[in-house]
Image: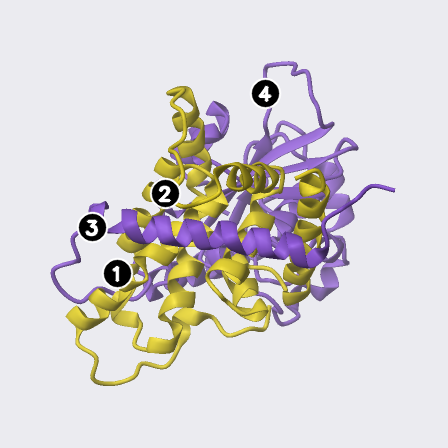
Chain colours: A yellow, B purple
Amino acid sequence: MDAVEVTELVPADSRTRDALVEELYGHGPMLLAAARVITLDTEEAEDLVQTTFEIALRRIDGLREPRAVRAWLLTIQTREAFRVVRRLRRLVRLDGRVGEIAADGTDLARDLDVRKALAGLPRRTRAAIALHYLAGLTVPETAIALGVSPNTVKSQLKAGLGRLREELRDG
Amino acid sequence: MVDRPSEAEVDARLRAYLGAEQRQAELDFPGLARPAPPAGPTRVGNRDGHPVGVLAAVVAVLVFAVLGSRFLGGSSVGITGAPTLTAGANASVPASAPSASLSASPPSASLAPPTQSNAPSARPSLGIVECGQISAAACAKAVALARAGHEAEVAGATRIVVDDTCPPTVVCDRIYPFDSIVVFVTAGADTTGWYAFSVVGKKADTPTDATPWGLPELPAHVVQTLKGPQPTP
């Protein structure tokens, strides 16, 4: 892929390290939400977010480009999701606990329908949906995070929405 | 005719679901434990990127591999990014060869005549490949499939271990006639630098699909190879 790696952006200037760390954590809710959509598992998602921050903190001195922080974090998280989460998922399934109830004020039945439909999608497709529709990454940014071409992302999004329509047609 | 929700309706439901996830995450995130930041400045990509030390090691391995194959005539082939393995060499690699090394270039390139071995590399070097029970041709293709789309992660690999998911002495009931594991080692024994892939195919010796694979799910014989000493070219 010819796209520029977000980890190789040109360092900028005067941001202090502490400020940058705080900015990283400012993206925490978005990372957690994306992780939950990708994994569909609360504990697994929390582990993934913490792993993402551990990696980000180790690499933080190489990042000075404020505009890239969000995409950079999501790229780290997404790549970790396909590397690490698999084992966590297996472990979490063994404990047999029921998932958490959705937040107050949401339409639970409709949420569950969408969640079930999302569960039927490949994890990579869920990741594309989370990065593009939830985190607001552009298609090229999503492609970098997933390590695929923009055309592949477009295909995944199209196929994903198509599958969701199929799954939700009775909803 | 099935009454299906329109694209806009599905989109709206999806956005509502994602919005609810975002709101819930905003409530939950402050309760998550924060990892402690490193005490001082860290090297960029110290573990997950491509530090100069690893690149230097890769270069050293490549130089040694080229010199070794040229002067020692060994069966291991150094990786230069250019094809160095012939079709004949593929056929001559025994299925039980534990450490056949070959080019990590795409399979089509790996079958090219060896006269191209001095051609400039179009791709970054990958490292020494150990093919286990897999034939050299299938091994090269499996590596190429695993690498595709994950170039950034595996660019710093100094070792690549490929093997059948079935242990050497066991007859397995297979779903896929070709069922292998490819592991890129980017940080030595540090498993956080291992990138594993399942590479399968519907025909024996013909890999066609690669997907990321969890390290805890690696077959024991593959882990044993990974923890063993790296063969020299």
Which quadrant is the C terminus of chain A positioned in?
top right
Q: CA distance from mark 1 to mark 3?
A: 9 Å
Which one is in front, B15 or B178? Answer: B15
- Residue annotated with mark 2: A104
User: How packed is label 4: few (under 14 Cα within 10 Å), some, or many (20 or more)?
Assistant: some
Seen in the picture, residue B56 relative to B140 is either above or below; the reply is below
Q: Which residue is mark 4?
A: B168
**Which of pointers 2 and 1 indicates the residue nearer the eye?**
2
Is residue B127 visible to the viewer in this orientation of the structure?
no
Nearest the viewer among B154 and B110 is: B154
Q: x, y percentage for residue B114? A: 72, 59
Q: Which mark is residue B34?
A: 3
User: Can you tell which mark lies on residue A25?
Assistant: 1
**Placement of the N terminus of chain A among the 4 image quadrants:** bottom right
Of marks 3 and 4, the one in the foreground: 3
Residue at mark 4 to residue at mark 1: CA–CA distance:
48 Å
Q: Chain of mark 3?
A: B
Residue nearest the viewer, comparing B17 with B205: B17
At label 1, the amino acid type is Tyr
Query: Image check: A122 left or right of A70?
Result: right
Alpha-carbon distance for marks 2 and 1?
25 Å
Which residue sits at x=36%, y=41%?
B191
**What type is the residue that disc 4 sits on?**
Pro
